[in-house]
Image (tube, rainbow, N blue to C red):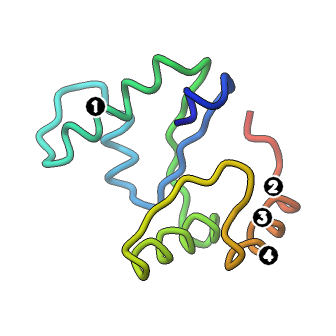
Amino acid sequence: LAAEWFNEKAILETDCKSLAAMLQNKEGLKSRLHFIIREAQAGENRLPAWRVEYARREQNRAMHELAQLAKRTKHSAVRCLRCPSCIEQIVAQEYNNSTSKF
């Protein structure tokens, strides 16, 4: 989606160290997530710059809360201009505390 909506540098953050390692690995994978990992890696070629970073849950509360929301509601959605109201305050806090990573 990032490649379709924006032609900008992208950072994919995950709180799963093993997933971050798999996404950064350019060699063959033996994971049951092989096809998902390959699809994510293919997206790298469609963006000017793409990087995978591991971030502890405490470092990205919005990411963690969105994952929990998806688990609770058994629903996922793509939102381009607005975040769910349940995390608006968290997003505002993280945005104000962040610095440019590029």
Locate residue 86, reporting x and y percent.
68, 79
Task: Name the side, left or right, on which 69 lies relative to 61.
Answer: left
The quadrant holding residue 60 is: bottom right
Upstream in sequence: badge 4 or badge 3:
4
Asked whether the beta carbons under mark 2 and mark 3 sit within 8 Å of each other, the answer is yes
The quadrant holding residue 71 is: bottom left
The residue that disc 1 covers is 38
Residue 1 lies, with reference to residue 67, above or below; the image says above
Q: Which mark is residue 89?
A: 4
Q: Disc 2 residue type? A: Ser
Which residue is located at x 81 percent, y 55 percent? 98
The residue that disc 2 covers is 98
Asked whether the beta carbons under mark 4 and mark 3 sit within 8 Å of each other, the answer is no
Upstream in sequence: badge 1 or badge 2:
1
Mark in front: 4 vs 3: 4
Under circle 1, the secondary element is helix
Q: Decide which of 12, 69 is in the foreground and name it.
A: 69
Disc 4 versus disc 3: distance between alpha carbons? 9 Å
Mark in front: 4 vs 2: 4
The residue that disc 3 covers is 94
Which residue is located at x 30 percent, y 25 percent? 26
Locate residue 59, reporting x and y percent.
64, 65
Q: Residues within 10 Å of mark 1 (few under 14, many from 20)?
A: some
Residue 65 lies, with reference to residue 81, above or below; the image says below
Under circle 4, the secondary element is helix
On-image quarter of the C terminus:
top right
Task: Name the side, left or right, on which 41 lies relative to 81.
Answer: left
Which residue is located at x 44 percent, y 27 percent? 43
Upstream in sequence: badge 1 or badge 3:
1
Locate residue 29, reporting x and y percent.
17, 35
